Amino acid sequence: MAPPVVTVFGTANFANAARVMACLEEVGVEYEVVEVDYMAKEHKGAEHLARNPLGQIPAFQDGDIKLFESRAIAKYVLRKYSKAAHVDLLREGNPEEAAMVDVWTEVEAHTYFPAIAPIFYECVVYPATHGIPTNQKVVDESLEKLKKVLDVYEAHLSRSKYLYLAGDFFSFADLNHFPFTFHVMTTPHASLFDSYPHVKAWWERVMARPSLKKISPDMVIRA
Amino acid sequence: MAPVKVFGSAVFANAARVMACLEEVGLEYEVVEVDYTAKEHKGPQQLSKNPFGQIPAFQDGDTMLFESRAIAKYVLRKYSKPAQVDLLREGNPEEAAMVDVWTEVEAHTYLPAIAPIFYECVVYPARLGTSSNQKVVEESLEKLKKVLDVYEAHLSKNKYLYLAGDFFSFADLNHFPYTFYFMTTSHASLFDSYPSVKAWWGRLMARPSVKKISDGMVLRA
């Protein structure tokens, strides 16, 4: 096996670390994963704060380059290593295509994620890692929000007939939806997507991606 | 060639974000007002431009976009003359990464801390005639102080003029709209405790594009 080129601080069970790893898999770059002990608050300790001053997971290192913020790390990896891998998930050479990638990347960050994240925390994280039972009221409110969001996604995909969010090409926009959607799909609320046939078909295309199939097993959050 | 259109006036912070970029690249643009009080942004015409019913939306010929940061980057990529304006630095992965890091920090950490103060102290009094919820403002100020601690350390330790380095970038510009509004409130004095941050803000406000757009950012009842 080739020696690692870069280091990710934070394991794949952290959704934002998984975002970065998915990109590393897409460009085929060897990476080392360094565990950060969340329960021991290692992410708030001096060593990790030197890598991520917000005390969050992940952080990243490529030689002298030290980065934090998973979407910034992901784009750095894609820009630096895509050409050799013949992958173009950002499309920055084409302003119209890049704009579509950016639109749905922003939607994930500001609209999709806030609707889906409480379901992830209540149904996956809190029971597994803190022994706290699910707050059904929070889950129900989030499901209502998520339905309105999925209405827009369904309309977008069915009207455009695109295979993926930004067009007929897999992109950074699709990849950004992977980590948190993966986790919610491990809960009973996965069935929500059955009411959105184009969204469901899109999700199955996304999950068929070898990079995502490879890191998914490491993402499972256990007690 | 018809000028590009921004749907939403500069009083909307996210529309101002887009307009600042248009000013930076020197591209002519038309502003189409969207009547927020009349819920025009939730009507069918605007929903066809922004399916989430938000402001702004944008049009360049056949290209229709929404999400202010996506629009902004489209404008910068398509219309920047690199010798004069390079706010994204996408030709240099290391520089672009620094621009992205502080753009992400603005979106996910800075904005959530500063936005409630903007809503409580600027928006709600102007649009709803209500007085600020002091508890919300106090909690946000405490969060914002912790965030500014990080910014102060970053700027002073690195001795950078701007967030991504010694060059003005998209990262700095993204902080402009909501910080501008914050600075119109009585809480502006908070920045006095953060000298490197205050100096950085001064540099930002000196930018001609920022000065021009901020003149239009007056939120009235």
Image (tube, coloured by chain):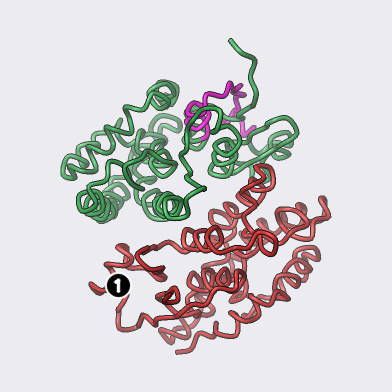
Give me the residue at 65% from left, 23% from top: A5
Question: In this orientation, does residue B143 appear?
Answer: yes
Q: Is B218 left, or right, of A177 in this rendering?
A: right
- Please state if A202 lies on the left or on the right of A78 as rendered: left
Residue A27 pos. (x, y %): 52, 28
> Does residue A173 lie above or below B201 as drawn?
above
x 40%, y 27%: residue: A212
Query: Residue at coordinates 79% horizontally, 68% vertically from top-left?
Result: B199
Residue at screen point 32% across, 27% down? A208
In terms of secondary structure, where does tag 1 sit?
A: helix
Q: Is residue A81 above or below residue B181?
A: above
Query: Magenta stretch: residue A27 in it?
Result: yes
Residue A54 percent location from the top left of the image: 64, 46
Give the extent of the magenta segment: A20-42
In depth, the one of B207 and A71 nearer the eye is B207
Q: Is residue B147 magenta?
A: no
Judge left or right: residue B54 versus residue B210.
left
Query: What chain is the green one?
Result: A
Q: Quadrant of residue B171?
A: bottom right
Q: Nearer the viewer, residue A169 or B211?
A: A169
Identify which amino acid the numbered label 1 is placed on: Gln
Q: Is residue B136 visible?
A: no
Quadrant of the image containing the C terminus of chain B: bottom left
Q: Looking at the picture, does residue A203 appear above or below residue B40?
A: above
Q: Colour of chain B?
A: red
Residue where numbered disc 1 is placed: B46
